[in-house]
Amino acid sequence: MASDELSSKLNRRLQIEEGAEEPVAVDLAEAQNGSDDKPTTANADSELGKKLQRREELNEGQGEHVQPSMKVFNPYTEFKEFSRQQIKDMEKMFKTYDTGKDNYIDMMELKLMMEKLQAPQTHLGLKNMMKEVDEDLDNKLSFREFLLIFRKAAAGELAEDSGLSALARLSEIDVSEEGVKGAKTFFEAKVHAINESNRFEAEIRQEQEAKKKQLEEQKQRRAAFKELQSAFK
């Protein structure tokens, strides 16, 4: 019985450390009098042994931590109304103004961005800009929220005199040609989806060809350098 009680206590302690249970305050006098019956589990010893062994393996680097599954943000699939080049241009701009390099644009960085775009905003104006696309209400813009600015601009959802409209207009990233193409019928939607897919594949092929050409040019330069180097030996 003593081993069962000890096993139950250790199991309880382990669950609290892992966050599986909340710690509960215990009446010390009541605990000393032994008035509470402790719940026991038939396989407590074996379960606890496995958990302790697993923790020991992780501490020694023999196992791998399993992270909870998280949805991965892919701008090319979520923002299909823009070409890959447009999204890359937006990403470049985002990184330019993310001076803290934390993958977010905070209020101060947004202020500096608007000043560099020669469209300075008041503090209230900056707050309104942030509020319009800050979906998780953390008072800073992720890259996804930054892309929402251009989606709203392309869809004509921004007021002409708003700060976000000025940002999109002065960013030198043209989204007017692409826009958000709405389909009126099912068949139009199917044709649009096929065209988008073909465009996406064509852009990937162009990128692959450009990389291949770049690698070939590097190879030729290395060969020419080696040939020149051998001539001096």
Image: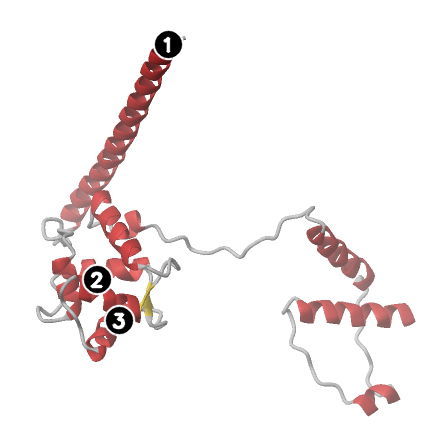
The CA span between labels 3 and 2 is 10 Å
To which residue does mark 2 refer? 149
Crowd class of label 2 (few under 14; some 14 to 19; many from 20; radius 10 Å): many
Q: Is residue 157 visible?
A: no
The spot of residue 85 in percent (x, y) is 22, 43
Q: Quadrant of the C terminus?
A: top left
Ranked by sequence position, the earlier of labels 3 and 2 is: 3
Q: Please name whichever residue, 41 or 58, is drawn nearer the observer in this view of the structure.
A: 58
Up/down of 84 relative to 24, above or below: above
The spot of residue 94 in percent (x, y) is 28, 56
Q: Relative to 194, is 104 on the left or the right?
A: right
Residue located at (65% from left, 73% from top) = 21
Total marks drawn? Answer: 3
The CA span between labels 3 and 1 is 63 Å
The spot of residue 70 in percent (x, y) is 46, 56
Q: Relative to 28, is 165 on the left or the right?
A: left
Q: Disc 3 or disc 1, which is closer to the eye?
A: 1
Amino acid, disc 3? Met
Classify mark 1: helix, strand or loop: loop
The CA span between labels 2 and 1 is 58 Å
Ranked by sequence position, the earlier of labels 2 and 1 is: 2
Classify mark 3: helix, strand or loop: helix
The spot of residue 150 in percent (x, y) is 19, 58
Q: Is residue 67 visible?
A: yes
Residue located at (38% from left, 57% from top) = 101
Amino acid, disc 2? Ile
Marking on residue 232: 1
Marking on residue 130: 3
Amino acid, disc 1? Phe
